[in-house]
Image (cartoon, rainbow, N blue to C red):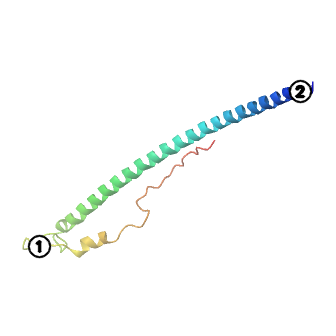
Amino acid sequence: MAGVQSSSTYKLDIESALAWLRRELMEMRSQDQALIRQLMDLHAGIQELKLECAEAEEEEEEDDETEEEGSWDFGSEAGGSGSSVYSSSGEVGFSISCLSTRMTPPPLGSSLPRRTSSRRSSLP
């Protein structure tokens, strides 16, 4: 009888171990799904930030072009007060005052857009 009892105990141990493994596997699957959702949210957020940065860079380039056009036209609009691109003899010349504003680079991080709204957390 001792052999029958030990084999049934052994079978019970295996069944309980298998049940525990199944529970662990199901829990791991649900954790994997949660992580996949987080990863997808992060990916979408990164894509959104890339788009915002690209749009901000385009706007900055347009602003720079507008500023440059405005600084070149400024001398001719002001009556040719020495900052004109053309000299009185028709030769092309440059004024130091026009170029000096473009010589200093913008501070680091100044071209990055400032976020006013907070992004929702993707943590559960």
Q: Name the residue under label 1.
A: 87
**Residue drawn 40% across the image and 60% down it:** 111
Q: Residue at x 89, y 27 (%)?
A: 3
Q: In the figure, residue 112 lies in which quadrant?
A: bottom left
Q: Where is residue 66 in the image (x, y as percent from the top left)?
A: 27, 58
Residue occupying image coordinates x 77% and y 33%: 17
- Nearest the viewer among 50 and 89 is 50
Mark 1 or mark 2: which comes first in sequence?
2
- Of the pair 112 and 100, the residue shown nearer to us: 112
| Residue 29, position as x, y percentages in the image | 63, 35
Image quarter hosting the N terminus: top right
Residue at the disc numbered 2 = 3
Residue 111 against residue 94 in the figure, above or below: above
Image quarter for residue 80? Answer: bottom left
* Relative side of 44 to 70, left or right: right
**Relative image position of residue 92 (x, y in whole percent):** 12, 70
Where residue 77 sits: x, y (%)?
18, 65
Residue lying farthest to the left in this orientation: 89
The residue nearer to you, when weighing 78 against 48, is 48
Question: Seen in the image, is 32 located left or right of residue 78?
Answer: right
Amino acid marked by disc 1: Ser
Q: Is mark 2 on a helix, strand or loop?
A: helix
Tell me what residue is drawn at x 75 percent, y 33 percent: 20
